[in-house]
Amino acid sequence: MKHLSLFFIFLVILLATSFSDAFTRNNFPKDFLFGAATSAYQWEGAVDEDGRTPSVWDTFSHSYNRGNGDITSDGYHKYKEDVKLMAEMGLESFRFSISWSRLIPNGRGLVNPKGLLFYKNLIKELKTHGIKPHVTLYHYDLPQCLEDEYGGWINRKIIEDFTAFADVCFREFGEDVKLWTTINEATIFAIGSYDQGISPPGHCSPNKFINCTTGNSSTEPYLAGHNILLAHASASKLYKLKYKSKQRGSLGLSIFAFGLSPYTNSKDDEIATQRAKAFFYGWMLKPLVFGDYPDEMKKTLGSRLPVFSKEESEQVKGSSDFIGIIHYITFYVTNQPSRSIFPSMSEGFIKDMGVYMISAGNSSFDVWEATPWGLEGILEYIKQSYNNPPIYILENGKPMERVSTLQDTQRIEFIQAYIGAVLNAIKNGSDTRGYFVWSMIDLYELLTGYTTSFGMYYVNFSDPGRKRTPKLSASWYTGFLNGTIDVSSQDTIQLQSNFSGSSSL
């Protein structure tokens, strides 16, 4: 009997361990939002239709041999079809961006009635199907005319123009939009666009990796970052003074957040990781929460880091109702030279940060391997260091090659692991309120064009009709959202079995 009792105790422990990680949609708060995301240039197409003018992204994409967003998924014409797919999937929210040059073709001044009508119709379609719109005002696509006129985000004139653009959006769409993100992944936007030259408008100092025609990597990313914060704060102030009491929406800034963890248990690597967090997270979060830049950045950058006036500091501080987190990958951080994932640059943000970063995946170079503990670490760090602000995970997903199968099992494993990490963070006290998969459907991607995709729906880009076909991940997300799939059970295996008969393109 003694041995039998021990057996049952062991069995109970085994069962408890087996199902401790199982969860369903119902384990999340009722008002938690599950959604999916796109952006205007990557989804809409129709770049020269109905009054839209070129953005810096048009110019940038046509300068490189990685494809462009001229047509992409043709969301401009197929938005009703896509919203129907979202409704069938059970999406609770859809994140999209407003094309500034479609809404206000000259960058400022007259509103384009056809552009305005498109976004009104899209929002109406979403609302009709019970899907909450989450609108990003700026997603890399500054009107080219403003870039030509004064240099865009490295000139303080952008603050006034962005605020005026935001004003139009709040006025025209604010009755139906309750969630606004001002500027997409502000950190990596400033770095990629004004330091490394890999995103529009493509500025960087001369280097052996990227052939930039203009830029200064040692100053421009910080100047752009400063103007991003001031433009965000200006739009936030406008919303609170003019719209919030009636429209009752929330407005936030989003950052791109790598997961960061020490490479070893050494004191040096712990210090290196804290320094990396100060640069990658604190650069934007500390001004938003406390009104100034991290000491680590001020000490390193000196006069290269812009200074907030007392009035600006007060305006930036507390200007975000929530923080948007865009997260895909996690790195180990070390103080020792090693196989850093980033190239060794002579100047710029990575050089200034002064640490080395290594892929945290099992494969040294598989940066896209699921490491959900990295996201948990971000959420815990923000909770402890920045007064536990409301957070939305605005992008998370896995790129896969555009091959001839729709069975994207790796994507499902990736997404469910990260959703589980979000649930763990919530249980540990994080005020995380939403999770958005990137992306709803296959899109034009900034760095890889059409060679890889993140979509839960396959888009046939060689078909003029841009036919959409659900991948296994779309079926999985549908099942998760309607409560028929229990993560960490046999449901996903059964889903894959049922799907196998229709998995070829």
Image (tube, rainbow, N blue to C red):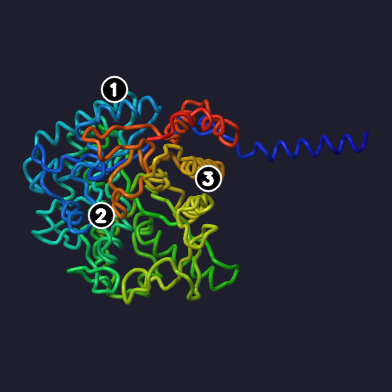
Q: Which quadrant would residue 303 be assigned to in this image?
A: bottom left
Q: Amino acid at mark 3?
A: Ala
In-image side of 50 versus 220 (left or right): left
In the rendered image, residue 482, in percent from the top left (x then y), is placed at 47, 26
Query: Could you tell me which residue is drawn at 16 percent across and 39 percent down?
Result: 46
In this rendered view, identify the residue nearer to me: 90 or 228: 90
Residue pointed to by mark 3: 421
10 Å neighbourhood of mark 2: few (<14), some, or many (≥20)?
A: some
Does dot 3 land on a helix, a strand or a loop? helix
Q: Nearer the viewer, residue 50 or 182?
A: 50
In the picture, which quadrant includes the C terminus? Answer: top left
Residue to which mark 2 is pinned: 66
Q: Is label 3 in contact with label 1 (beta carbons under 8 Å)? A: no
Describe residue 51's horizontal placement relative to residue 457 as left or right: left
The first of marks 2 and 3 along the sequence is 2
Q: Which residue is mark 1?
A: 128
| Residue found at x 49% / y 53% | 369
- Real-space Cα separation, disc 2 to disc 3, in angstroms: 34 Å
- Nearer the N terminus, badge 1 or badge 2? 2
Nearest the camera: 208 or 307? Answer: 208
How far apart are labels 1 and 2 at the CA level? Answer: 37 Å
Amino acid on which the number 2 mark rests in the picture = Arg
Label 3: few (<14), some (14–19) or many (≥20) C-alpha neighbours in 10 Å = many
Query: Mark 1 or 2, which is nearer the eye?
Result: 2
Q: Could you tell me which secondary element the residue under label 2 belongs to?
A: loop
475 relative to 485 in the view: left or right? left
Tell whether 201 sits left or right of 84. Answer: left
**Where is residue 402 drawn, in percent x and y?**
36, 45
Q: Where's the N terminus, which quadrant?
A: top right
Q: Residues within 10 Å of mark 1 (few under 14, many from 20)?
A: few
Q: Earlier in the sequence, mark 3 or mark 1?
A: 1
> What is the tally of numbered marks visible in this picture?
3
